[in-house]
Amino acid sequence: MINVIKKTTPAVVSIVISKLFYKLRQELPFDLFGPFGLPFPFLEKIPPKKKIRIGGGSGFIVSSDGIVLSNRHVVIDPQSDYTVVTSDGQEYKAKVLARDSIYDIAVLKIDSKKKFSTIKLGDSSKLQLGQTTIAIGNALGEFQNTVSTGIVSGLSRYITAHDAMAKQSQRLRGLIQTDAAINPGNSGGPLLDIEGKAIGINAAMVFGAENIGFALPVNHAKKDLADLKKYGKLRHPTLGIRHIILNEELKETHKLPHAYGAMIIPEPMPGDTGVVKGSPAAKAGLKEKDILLECDGKKINEKNTLEEIIEKHQVGDVLNFKVYSRGKTKTMNITLGVRG
């Protein structure tokens, strides 16, 4: 294991998030100002074009030309600047190539012609409970290349992650659970197997609990990397609907006809119907409150979500749905489009 750590740590990086002060001031809450909204004196002494560090995370290099994998929530702000710090202390500007909002994955490119050390990607579909894991990252934003070990203690986990910076929550699914310590700042670092291959991207920890951490399966990142190489952008399939997965509680509360399926619901904004204009769902005639009950003969429910079904397919695939609409059940074929 010592040799594995020596081999992989040069490819693990810290990601520093910074922002020009004048942009940051526009986002400061009112309570950071003095009486009548006037800024406190110390704020006036900071040059407007000075860059202020506002956060950090981890990442790891997966190709020698400087492609880095991390979490989307680490680099979520398009107005911030990102600097990659390698294990030898060198700093490089980095550009965000893609942010995958479904799986919380980000792909960055280091601005340098240097050849970098890399970590090979494993196969997260072959993970087994009890196998050894090694987590590496920038723990607490201070301790670079902190190493912890453990085992795979759960597979296909679902959690709701809260992002204070983005002020939003995200449902993450299909996660790897590990008892290797994952701390704030570790986000984006690699979860390795005993051979030193990345099987996951460290994503979250549970506050108030010990030895419970989560990582994103690396196979999702492999698909994103393949999309970027082939199309220059992420190419995820979509139906083009906003929905909620039904269960017994929702059925009883809202007097619904089914306790399973994906019901189309609108966003709380004027004119929204839950169906994106021009999308495959719109072309198929789906409407608000329609319930997609089955896909290719399998029930859609909390264990077999619509998102998971769609992500297993490619753009252009034709799926057969059983749909409950206005008191009637019917079947329809829908061709998946590209999510914008």
Image (cartoon, rainbow, N blue to C red):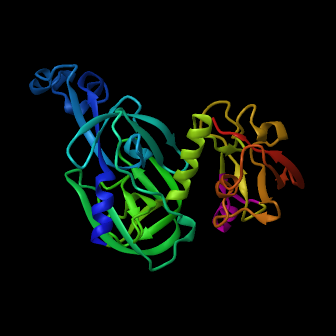
Residue 246 on the magenta segment: yes
Give the total number of marks visible in the rendering: 0
Identify the magenta region.
Answer: 244-256
Expressed as whole percent of the image width and height from the top left, the position of residue 257 reads: 78, 61
Taking 38 as reference, is 123 above or below it?
below
Residue 192 on the magenta segment: no
Taking 215 as reference, is 126 above or below it?
below
Q: Residue at x 35, y 41 (%)?
A: 115
Quadrant containing the N terminus is bottom left
Q: Residue at x 34, y 33 (%)?
A: 112
Q: Quadrant of residue 146?
A: bottom left
Can residue 208 be seen? no
Residue sitting farthest toward the front: 115
Q: Residue at x 33, y 52 (%)?
A: 11
Q: Quadrant of residue 275?
A: top right
Residue sitting farthest toward the bottom: 130
313 lies left or right of 158: right
Quadrant containing the C terminus is top right
Can residue 125 be seen? yes
81 lies left or right of 303: left
Q: Quadrant of residue 230?
A: top right
Q: Residue at x 64, y 67 (%)?
A: 303
Taking 75 as reference, is 144 above or below it?
below
Q: Nearer the viewer, residue 156 or 36?
A: 156
